[in-house]
Image (cartoon, rainbow, N blue to C red):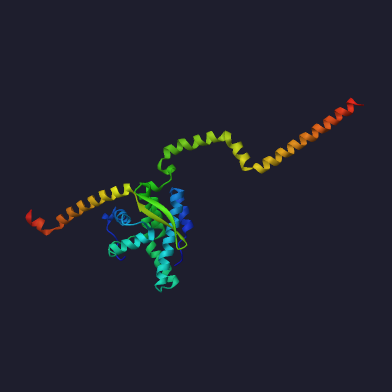
Amino acid sequence: MGQTNPPFMSGVPELLLMRLLAQRDMYGYELVRSIRLVTGDSISLGEGVIYPVLHGLERGGALKATRKAVDGRTRVYYRLTAAGKKRLDRLQGEWQRIQSGINSALDPLTHVAT
Amino acid sequence: MSRPDFEQMRNELLANGVSARVAARSVAELSDHFDDIEAEAMSAGTARDKASELANLRLGQPRTLIAAISSRQDLRSWMYRFPRLAQVVLPLTCVLLLPAMPVFAGVAHLSSVLRWLTALLLSALITATLMLLLQLSITFS
C-alpha cells in the first residue's frame, strides 16, 4: 500500500472489480483483499473508495447486490450480471488494446526502426 | 485513533444530494469494512488502538470517502439528478395532495377521530331523547 496511484488509473478499479466478480460473488472487504492479492499490492486503493464504484456499477446494471447472513453478520454480496459480463469483455478488450499500444510506444526497438 | 463518525458521514452524504438508500448502504458497508480490518489486525495480535489506527488509514479519510461518493452523479437522488423535473413534479404533487390532506390527517389520527365521532353521536342521541321526552310530556299533558 505504499505508493499512490498515477492519474491514468481512472477506470482500473472498475475493471478489477468486475474481473474478480466474474470468478465468484464477493463482498466489499473480500474484493479489496483479492485486489491486493492478485495485483501483488502494486495497486493501492483507499479501500472505502470501492463502494461508490460498486454502487455505480450496480446502478448501471453490471452488478447485482444481495444481502446474505454469514457468521451472524449480514453481508452485501455482489454478483456480475449478464450485462456486466458484456461490459467486462468490452473493457478488457479496450484495456488490452491500450496496453499493447503503450508497450509498443515504450519499446526502444520501435524507435530504432522509425 | 477512534472509529469514524459514520452517522455524521451519512448526514453529509444526504446534504450533498446522495440518495438516501445509497447513503445508508454506503455507511453500513464502510462501517462493516472498518470492523473487518480492525478484527483482522487484532486477530494477528495488534492492540486495539493500533488496529483502529490501521483501519482508519486503510479505509480512507471520511472527507475523501464523502467526496468520492458525492462526486458520482449516478448515486445522487433523482431530485439532484433532474432538478428541472423536480421543480415541476414536487409542487404539482403538493397541489394534488392538498385536498387529500384532511383524509391523511384523519387516518393518521384515527383513534382521536373515532372518539370524537362517538362523543358526537352520543350527544346527538341524548339531545334527541330529551326532545322526545319533552314532546311526549307536551302531548300527554
Q: Tell me if A32 is positioned left or right of B27 in this view.
A: left
- Residue that appears at 83% across and 33% down: B130
Q: Is residue B44 above or below residue A88?
A: below
- Residue that appears at 45% across and 71% down: B48
| Front-lying residue, B63 or B46 | B46
Q: Is residue B15 visible?
A: no
- Residue that appears at 36% across and 61% down: A30
| Front-lying residue, A76 or B65 | A76
Quadrant location of the C terminus of chain B in the rendered image: top right
| Front-lying residue, A26 or B10 | A26
Q: Is residue B29 above or below residue B79?
A: below
Q: Position of residue B4 (x, y in %)?
A: 45, 62
Q: Quadrant of residue A25?
A: bottom left
Q: Is residue B132 above or below residue B33?
A: above
Number of marks drawn? 0
Quadrant location of the N terminus of chain B in the rendered image: bottom left
Q: Which residue extends farthest right?
A: B141
Q: Which residue extends farthest left?
A: A113
Q: Position of residue B57 (x, y in %)?
A: 38, 65
Q: Tell me if A109 is positioned left or right of A36 in this view.
A: left
Q: Quadrant of residue B110?
A: top right
| Front-lying residue, B61 or A45 | A45
- Residue that appears at 42% across and 37% down: B84
Q: Position of residue B39 (x, y in %)?
A: 43, 68
Q: Is residue B121 visible?
A: yes
Q: Position of residue B93 (x, y in %)?
A: 51, 36
Q: Tell me if A83 is positioned left or right of B23 in this view.
A: left
